[in-house]
Amino acid sequence: MAEEVERVVATEAARALVRELRAEHGPLMFHQSGGCCDGSAPMCYPAGELRVGASDVLLGEIEGCPVYIGGQQYERWRHTQLILDVVPGRGAGFSLEAPHGVRFLTRSRVFGEQELCRLDQRGTGEPPDEIP
């Protein structure tokens, strides 16, 4: 049986920070928008603090926290796996990691042909509406 293709994953450093932030703030959510500069960084919020729009796409979960992406950005990145990472420095905005002197960032990896086929076998290559 083929391994499930994940649209979003995280480095261990990012996972550790998510666990720390969740212990501090409770349930969390992420949103990857398509803005410029820090507006294109993944933003971490308390769950429900950011209203998810009808065009936003649920990519998956990191440490039990849903990760959404703007619909237009998803169309540009649908052939890539997003990799949530963390680096030293402060980003702008209201993301919860800012007071820790670090910021989340997104790296990406283009899916291989077999991975794209497995995504297509799930339907149209779209992520599921809900993560089981």
Image (spheres, rainbow, N blue to C red):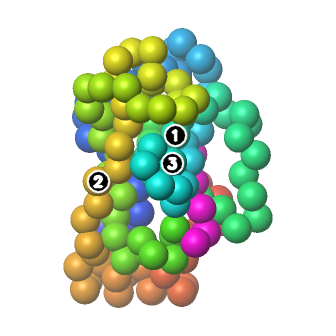
Name which of mark 3 and mark 2 comes first in the sequence. Answer: 3
**Residue, disc 2:** 107
**Residue, disc 1:** 43
Q: Is residue 3 left or right of residue 54?
A: left
**Which element type, helix, strand or loop, lies under badge 2?**
strand
Three-letter amino acid code at disc 1?
Met
- For the C terminus, which image quadrant? bottom right
Q: Residues within 10 Å of mark 1 (few under 14, many from 20)?
A: many
Three-letter amino acid code at disc 2?
Arg
Residue span colored magenta: 64-72
Q: Residue at x 36, y 58 (%)?
A: 82
Q: Residue at x 73, y 36 (%)?
A: 48
For the residue pair 110 and 26, the one nearer the viewer reads as 110
Name which of mark 1 and mark 2 comes first in the sequence. Answer: 1
Query: Which mark lies nearer to you, 3 or 2?
Result: 3
Disc 3 to disc 2, C-alpha distance: 15 Å
Residue 68 among magenta residues: yes
Q: Residue at x 48, y 32 (%)?
A: 92
